[in-house]
Image (cartoon, rainbow, N blue to C red):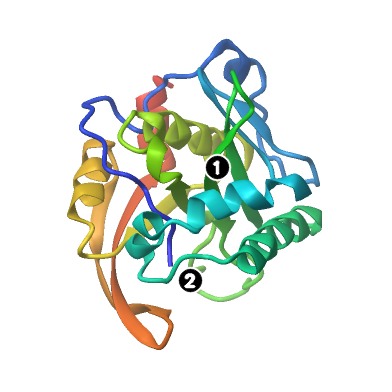
Amino acid sequence: MTDRLEAEREQTHLWAPRESRQARADERPRMSEHRSVLIEGTTLRLREFLPSDVEGVLGIFGDPRTTREFGMPPFRRPEAAALVEQARAGARRTPRSHYRLGVSEIATGELIGSAKLIVEDQSAEGGMVRVGYRSAEVGLALRADRVSVGHSVEIGFLLGILGFDRLGLHRVWSGFMPSNIAAQRAIEKAGMVREGRLRHYGHVDGVWHDIVQYSILEDDWKALRGH
């Protein structure tokens, strides 16, 4: 189940080049080797999770206003601790395919969200068709008191830097619960293209859920970046 991408009423594209000087200076292609992620925008940064982030994660996923968008109950503290440990374990794997990252405010250092980028399995070679090649799923969950203030625009751009500029991906996709109409409208304004509805693609607590899927391709990203 993909994380929550909050609805924004802004007209600015989610993937548009609203980068800071730091983000421009820190771009590097193809981050295939093990390396900690730190990408800064104008007001927010993507960074690796720390053991001290458990309470912050609980503040995000322990709120039913957030978890209802995923069709799941709020986290308890053990579940928040497990998410942090899974994120840190994923960061240690080589090659790395799971990027579960904290979203923090540059000014205060406060954790306000969780973002993810999961690279699809690249091992299936030799067949006539390579499905999911250079593709990844992205998702975002913001703390309930930090939604609808434009953060998803900046975070989406930082995820684009990670996925396209650093990892050399060709396609990035995201999915939403069909009931989350506001998020779908926001992602369409952001430049992602609706691909269709995947029936019973998500399974949470014994319940099947359809997922509405969107994507952006590297050519779209280059066009938005002015390349």
The residue furthest top is 21
Q: Dot 2: what SS?
A: loop
Q: Which residue type carries mark 1?
A: Gly
Residue, disc 2: 129
Q: How many marks?
A: 2
- Viewport quadrant of the C terminus: top left
Q: Dot 1: what SS?
A: helix
Quadrant housing residue 190:
top left
Res. 36 visible in picture: yes
The residue furthest bottom is 206
Q: Which of the two residues, 114 or 75, is positioned nearer the viewer here?
A: 75
Judge from the rendering whether residue 55 lies leftward or rightward of residue 148; answer left or right. right
Residue at 45% over, 49% down: 141
Judge from the rendering whether residue 34 lies leftward or rightward of residue 80; answer left or right. right
Residue at 35% over, 70% down: 71
| Mark 2 surroundings: few (<14), some (14-19) or many (≥20) residues within 10 A | few
Measured along the vertical axis of the image, is residue 54 above or below residue 129? above
Q: Which residue type carries mark 2?
A: Val
The percent position of residue 153, horizontal first and vertical second, equals 37, 31
The percent position of residue 45, horizontal first and vertical second, equals 59, 29
The percent position of residue 116, horizontal first and vertical second, equals 55, 51
The percent position of residue 122, horizontal first and vertical second, equals 62, 64
Mark nearer the N terminus (1 vs 2): 2
Residue, disc 1: 163
Residue 4's tag is none
Residue at 69% over, 56% down: 84
Measured along the vertical axis of the image, is residue 197 above or below residue 115? below
What's the CA distance linking mark 1 and mark 2?
A: 22 Å
Quadrant housing residue 105:
top right
Residue at 49% over, 36% down: 160
Res. 50 visible in picture: no
